[in-house]
Amino acid sequence: MSHSSTSHLIEMANQIALNLSHGREQLECISEIAKHIQRFWAPSMRLQLIALVALDNPQIHQRVNIAVTQLSDYSAPT
């Protein structure tokens, strides 16, 4: 994955988190982020985001990090 596509993916995920944060409790916000990504992102994009979260990328919003664990594509590290 190129640096520009990585940056763009992170930017999109963080923007979703910011847009869905207004007026919601944290748990509801995290659930909505996961639902949005699950519904509207291609499986390849979700897998890329999961890989970035697994690397503890500091640019990814904390709510995105948590929301990723709710995606159907996610499998917990062993």
Image: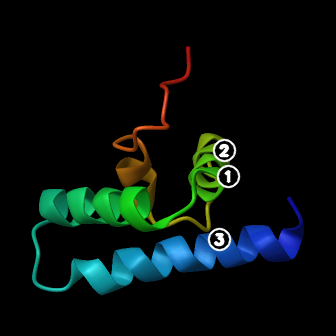
Front in this rendered view, residue 53 or 34: 34
Residue wearing tag 2 = 51
Identity of the residue drawn at 86% across and 70% down: 3
The amino acid at mark 3 is Leu
- Residue labelled with disc 3: 9
Determine whether, in the image, residue 45 is placed left or right of residue 1.
Answer: left
Does residue 14 lie above or below 30 as drawn? below
Give the residue displayed 44% in from the left and 68% down from the top: 40
Mark 3: secondary structure: helix
- Count of labels in the image: 3
Image height of 77 relative to 63, above or below: above
Asked whether the residues under the numbered discs 1 and 2 touch, taking CB atoms below 8 Å apart as contact, a structural biologist would say yes
Q: Position of residue 54 (x, y in %)?
A: 61, 40
Instruction: Answer left or right for 38 relative to 31.
Output: right
**Rendered location of residue 18, percent (x, y):** 36, 82
Nearer-N-terminus badge (3/1): 3
